[in-house]
Amino acid sequence: MGTSTSHRSPVTAEWDRVRELYLTPNPAPGEIVGRIVAALDDAARQRLHDAAVVRCLDSVLAGSADLAEGRSQLVPAQETGSAALDLAGRLRRQAADRIGADHVASVTGTLALDAIPPTVVAALGPTPAWYELPAETVTARYGRYTTEQDLSVLTGEFCAQDFDRVFRYFVTRDLADHVGEAAAPTVTAAARLVDRVGEFCQARGRPPGLRRVEQDLQEMARLPEEQRSRALDPLVASMIREGLAGLAGG
């Protein structure tokens, strides 16, 4: 896998079945996603929960615990003019710094980094003016996932946002070769197809049963930094496997 869309999908019968859909008028996003899941080999599936992805989820969870327990403080909108965007940017940088320091950078890690800001924004609640929320409100709303024992909800949101970006990547790297054909007669239609795939993953990408690991997540989020990723690793692997199975059900 490469970050550039010039890196096409493997030449296999399974990936050929994915590409066939780009020759079909109005392919269903769920069918595209299901065929991509079927085309992923073991190595590709393992990359979806690699060390960089784990560090991204760790940043999302530890950020809530730090705010809830007073180990971190948001000051009024110092960087972007929005406390929500400041928090999102801070958590993304923390994850990126750890990925760099630990020498575990990857394509899937880059996609997971990009899933952090929308996870934070979505976690702040369905308000049209989230970007105007004061620092104390952002702190309370994001910290509540720890205080109200809801880190599993935050984890599910991250997983959905991550799958959104992963499957957009998978589609985009092949779809460019098929603009002008049935599924994507124009560049605008191709972009809309990619959006539909992402929206499908956001709607269906939360693994079932995360509530059962809530106490584990609460304990992991409070561990020292050097221990958290090791503790999260098997949980993230299981979460990705279950999420892929759900997406495959289309």
Image (cartoon, rainbow, N blue to C red):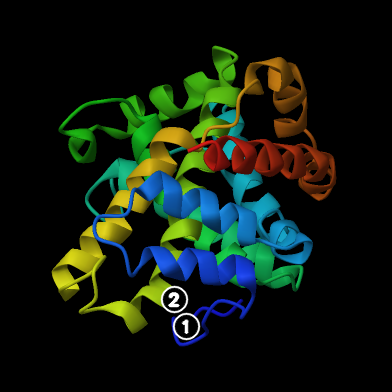
Q: Position of residue 32 (x, y in %)?
A: 44, 54
Relative vertical location of residue 64 with respect to residue 29 in this rendering, above or below: above
- Depth check: 11 or 67 in front? 11
Count the labels in the image: 2
Residue 245 visible to an observer of this rendering: yes
Q: Is residue 106 above or below residue 200?
A: below
Query: 241 or 54: which is nearer to us?
Result: 241
Q: Which residue is mark 1?
A: 4
Side of 86 where 148 appears, left or right: right
Label 1: few (<14), some or many (≥20) within 10 Å? Answer: few
- Residue at the (45%, 45%) spot, across then down: 161
Q: Earlier in the sequence, mark 2 or mark 1?
A: 1
Q: Quadrant of residue 199?
A: top left
Q: Callout 2: helix, strand or loop?
A: helix
Give the camera-side residue of 95 and 168.
168
Provide the residue designation for mark 2. Answer: 173
Q: Is 188 on the left-hand or right-hand side of 133?
A: left
For image coordinates 78% across by 47% down, the residue present is 229
- Where residue 108 sits, quadrant-wise, is bottom right
